[in-house]
Amino acid sequence: MESKQVKILLDKFFEGKTTLEEERLLEIYFHQDEIADAFVPFQSYFVHTRSVQSVSIDKQLSLPDKSFLSVMGKRIASIAAIGLAVFSLTVFDFNKPTEEELAFAAFKENMFLVSNQLNRAEQDITYINYLYNTPNQSKK
Amino acid sequence: MTDADFICLIRPIEDKLYRLSRRYLISNEEAQDAVQEVMLKMYAHIQKVKILHNFEGYAMRMARNYCLDRLKSKQAATLRLVHRTETSDQNNLDRKLDNNDSLEWVKKLTHNLPQQQQMILQLRDVEAYEFEEIAKIMDMNPGAVRVALSRARKTLRKKLIEIHNYGIQTG
């Protein structure tokens, strides 16, 4: 590439008006051993850019499915634990009698006692009646 | 999408994600973690949407957002400033320039630019993205990207000429 053409491209480059293809031409030009003196200050930029392009990740990344599943597994376990806790609390709450139920149970117990007392009283009256009638029969 | 399909999509852009993350986070380890996180997020995302028209652009944008979040977080305060020499496969020309500290100068000058300009330089000059793609990744409009790129390159031009002239005068 001629120096005149390089100058035009460089001016466009610094204005941010070059296409990717033109920038590629500049990159190729600046990777030559011999370049015009006027452009020497900019050579290091293009060489630096290419060296950065060669940087690559040197860590083996874990496969997404494995890590993802382990994350999902933990999430599912957490949700299950929360669900179980909520269910247990709900069940315990249902087993625990309410105030109305306690009052009804107490009332039922009282009524049972009253009923027993009444039954016993009725038996006593029957027995008294029997005793009352028995002497009259013997008098006869 | 199967796991194999996903790996076919993510493998070619791993290094781009890494370089972008490293530009933001400086630390190699942090950048590696960032790529891992982005990979997992992309995997989860693609399971939901099934089809992603611009996978690479979306991943780059996700990496940018992740890095910005990391920088904002408290953990960023303890980031280790680990730099690794990135010229393992230099050719003769690189070595010649390295001897003159030119590459180090370019690296320093680039690091001194505003963060946004650094990122745009990275995406254009290193990753060779079109302005529209950079605009999407950076959440800017293409015109603003062009202006920022021009400013960054002009700043570098000015500094490189100064350094070069200083070298000539002192040499």
Image: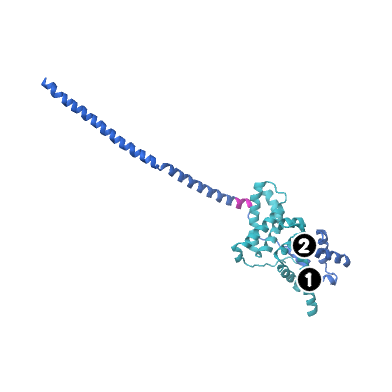
Chain colours: A blue, B cyan
Residue under mark 2: which chain is it in? B
Looking at the image, residue B60 lies above or below residue A129? below
Q: Are marks 2 and 1 on the same chain?
A: yes
Tell me the kind of residue under disc 1: Lys
Q: What residue did someone put label 1 on?
A: B158
- Residue A50: within the magenta? no
Specify the segment rendered in magenta: A64-68
Q: Quadrant of residue A35?
A: bottom right
CA separation in Å, label 2 and label 1: 16 Å
Residue furthest out toward the bottom = B170
Res. B68 image quadrant: bottom right
Q: Secondary structure at mark 1?
A: helix
Would residue A83 be seen by someone viewing this image from the given angle?
yes
Residue A34 picture location, percent across and down: 84, 69
Dominant secondary structure of the residues highlighted in magenta in the image: helix
**Residue identifier under label 2:** B147
Q: Is residue A2 left or right of residue A79?
A: right
**Mark 1 crowd level (few <14, some 14–19, many ≥20, 10 Å Cα):** few
Residue sitting at 56 percent across and 50 percent down?
Answer: A75
Residue occupying the point 77% across, 61% down: B146
Kind of residue at badge 2: Val
